[in-house]
Image (tube, rainbow, N blue to C red):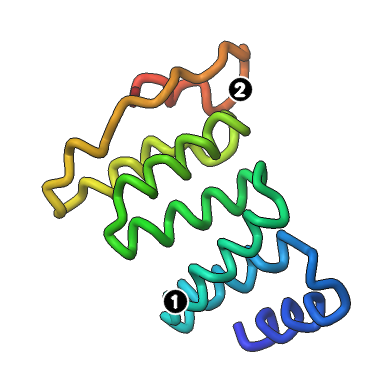
Amino acid sequence: MAEAKTNVEQALLLDGTLAQAHVALGEVKDYYEWDHEEAGQEFARALALAPNSERALRGQGWHQIRMKRFEEARRALRRAWELDPFSHPPQGWTASMTSGTQQRKFAAPLPPLPDRPGHPGKGLSFLN
């Protein structure tokens, strides 16, 4: 993980406007270093640079779940879902917000998957 962090930091030195690099650094800080404050700042930078980045919204959503900011997490994950309904269905994320927290009110139903025959995510629509 140290090598990944070094590579991301080098990329940001070359171009600090790389939203995906800020997301990657946020993930390193959130998941591996447990530096949640810095991670939140990286996700915020990524979204400032690319407000419609599904990956940045997803990263921010997961981060907000860890910080127990469930309503903010739900909004970020819902927006990520709207931008790319076939990427990492957030029903599981919504379940993560409720698992062991008694925060069931935040597990609002998500829009159904678009109808795309043969898409592997189509079967997940039963989770809505």
Residue sitting at x 68%, y 79%: 4
Identify the image quadrant of residue 16: bottom right
Identify the image quadrant of residue 35: bottom left
Kindly give the residue lying farthest to the left in the view shown. Answer: 102
Question: What is the secondary structure assignment of the residue under circle 2?
Answer: loop
* Disc nearer the start of the sequence (2/1): 1
Q: Which mark is residue 121?
A: none
Residue sitting at x 62%, y 44%: 54
- Give the distance between the C-alpha atoms of the residues marked 2 and 1, in whole angstroms: 37 Å
Q: Where does the image place residue 67, in percent across and percent down from the top left?
A: 32, 64
Mark 1 neighbour class, 10 Å CA radius: few under 14, some 14 to 19, many 20 or more: few
Mark 2 neighbour class, 10 Å CA radius: few under 14, some 14 to 19, many 20 or more: few
Residue sitting at x 81%, y 76%: 11
- Above or below residue 58? Residue 118 is above
Front-lying residue, 22 or 113: 22
In the picture of the structure, the residue carrying the numbered disc 1 is 37
The amino acid sitting under disc 2 is: His
In the picture of the structure, the residue carrying the numbered disc 2 is 119
In the displayed structure image, the side of residue 114 where residue 99 appears, left or right: left
The amino acid sitting under disc 1 is: Glu
Check the picture and name the quadrant holding the C terminus.
top left
- Above or below residue 63? Residue 111 is above
In the displayed structure image, the side of residue 12 where residue 115 appears, left or right: left
